[in-house]
Image (cartoon, rainbow, N blue to C red):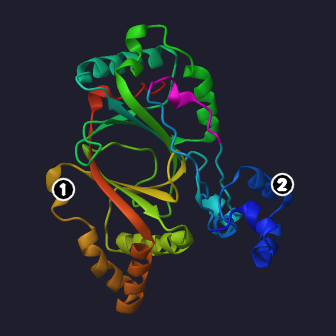
Amino acid sequence: MVCLTHALTDGASSDQNALLRIPVPERERLLTTARCTISDVLRSEATGLICDELSFRRSPTGGPVRFMALAFAISLTMGAAAASQSSEDIAYFHLNRVKPSMTVEYETARKRHWVWHQKMGDTWSFHVWQIVSGEASGTYMVCSFGHSWKDVDESDQKVGGEEDDPSARVEPYLDAEWESYYRYLPQLSVAANGGFSPSAKLAVTRLLLKPEQVGSFVAAETKIRAAMRKAGYAGPMRWYQLVSGGETPQFLLLADRADWAGYEQPVEEKLDSMMEKMYGKDQAARLMRDARSAVRSQHVETWQYRADLSFVPAAKQ
């Protein structure tokens, strides 16, 4: 793939002409910050999706990772795409890998840490899951949903400092931690509007896509969602796209499960039938092929909700 800076100096004329149609301020910002290809930029401009290549930031020694400023992120949207996105569609994910034999100490500190958040007047809800299958088994995922970038900045100011109670610090018990930010994709999701209500388990699928096939993947998944809706599938099943904190293009699918029995009849086994009823055999097969062929790797795992470690501030009266 050709980087933006290389394309402008190596004579990729057709891409150059297309790039020049992007407004000058936006184009200059891309040239100074982006590592996307020109085709990625143009595809992002057409679809309203994210185009970025950011390093997966890691803090093995701890520290206030949650409130460190983002290095950069690119969000290119057209008017129609922007209209379909909420201003409060940013989700925060913070993976905590605990040192061996430090689980009790970590969980105790995590609970005290939320007391400190409450003292500071934090209004964010933080849901905690423990990963119970896959190579990350035993680690914790701290998540917060439904924010704007302005919310992130304001939270940075409110709880970005050091805790005044050393026993409320979780960092001494962490072997490593990772943070990332995702954007919720309502046009792909099957879920009720109005907040995130955690289920007992989450079936989590992490997809890395082929950059040149992001557009066809999103188009196919949009059609799949319509077929699922028509067939009466209620979900919840939520899609997110990585903005910052990992390899891209990356999509995350969170599907609610009440228990392990919920895995007996996965919706994937019913999709072909749903699609054929909606679009006919040939078009359904093409759409499913577009969705599946865009994936270059897939990782699945299960998260178990830990209400005892989560923080949900009381609603204001």
Image-quadrant location for residue 13:
bottom right
Q: How many marks?
A: 2
Question: Relative to 95, is 1 on the left or the right?
Answer: right
Observer-side mark, 2 or 1, equals 2
Question: Relative to 87, is 193 on the left or the right?
Answer: left
What amino acid does circle 2 point to? Pro
Q: Point out residue 83 in the picture as x, y percentages from the top left corner.
A: 64, 59
Residue 280 on the magenta span: no
From the viewer's side, name the closer residue of 123 and 171. 171
Q: Main secondary structure of the magenta part?
A: loop
The residue segment tinted magenta is 61-71
Within 10 angstroms of label 1, few (less than 14), some, or many (20 or more) residues? few
From the viewer's side, name the closer residue of 133 and 175. 175
Please determine whether, in this image, residue 242 is positioned above or below residue 15. above
What amino acid does circle 1 point to? Gly
Within 10 angstroms of label 2, few (less than 14), some, or many (20 or more) residues? few
Image-quadrant location for residue 95:
top left
Q: CA distance from mark 2 to mark 1?
A: 50 Å
Residue furthest to the front in view is 10
Question: Relative to 94, is 281 on the left or the right?
Answer: left
Residue furthest to the top in view is 165
Label 2, on which residue? 25
Label 1, on which residue? 262
Q: Point out residue 155 in the picture as x, y percentages from the top left corner.
A: 58, 28
Is any part of residue 90 visible from this angle? yes
